[in-house]
Image: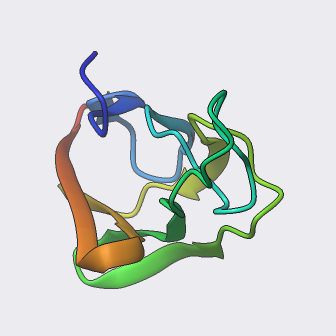
Amino acid sequence: MKPDTPRIDMPTTAKIGEVIQIKTKIRHPMETGWRKSNDGQTVPRNRLTQFSCSFEGETIINAQYDSGVASDPYLLFYAKVTKAGLFDFRWEGDNNQVIHSQVALNIHL
């Protein structure tokens, strides 16, 4: 997985009414801007600050990352299946950084 590439672990098919588990992890250094390099220079701030997931335009989760979040942030959450559709994942960070990914969910009987 290259830096800033999200890993999303969730089913791609489910039954109506089922509650599914969604796991996300993204490779990111999450530098606070407080750390010094080996040569004494301040390592520039480079953090993700926001994560959101929506399903067909409806927000499922909206989270803010703070300076205490470790590198490669991981989130686990649940969603109740109401229909087939598209999950939209979005990470936002310093310097107008935006990472976006989508996963389709299909219904099975």
Q: Say above or below: 48 vs 28.
A: below
Please indicate whether residue 8 sits to the left or right of residue 56 in the image: right
At x 20%, y 58%, the residue is: 100
Q: Quadrant of residue 56?
A: bottom left
Q: Give x and y (percent) for residue 3.
A: 30, 30
Which is more toward the observer, 97 or 46? 46
* Quadrant (top left/top right/bottom left/bottom right) for the C terminus: top left
- Please say which color scheme the image uses: rainbow
At x 54%, y 64%, the residue is: 45
- Residue at the extreme front of the image, as rendered: 39
Please indicate whether residue 93 sits to the left or right of residue 50 in the image: left
Which is more toward the observer, 56 or 8? 8
Q: Give x and y (percent) for residue 27.
A: 43, 32
Which is more toward the observer, 49 or 82? 49
Q: Give x and y (percent) for residue 12.
A: 26, 30
Can you see residue 43? yes
Please indicate whether residue 90 sits to the left or right of residue 106 in the image: right
Q: Quadrant of residue 1?
A: top left
Q: Quadrant of residue 57?
A: bottom left
At x 50%, y 59%, the residue is: 44
Q: Give x and y (percent) for residue 8.
A: 38, 32
- Residue at the extreme right of the image, as rendered: 68
Q: Say above or below: 48 vs 72.
A: below
Can you see residue 109? no
At x 63%, y 50%, the residue is: 78
Give the total number of marks visible in the rendering.
0
Q: Say above or below: 73 vs 8.
A: below
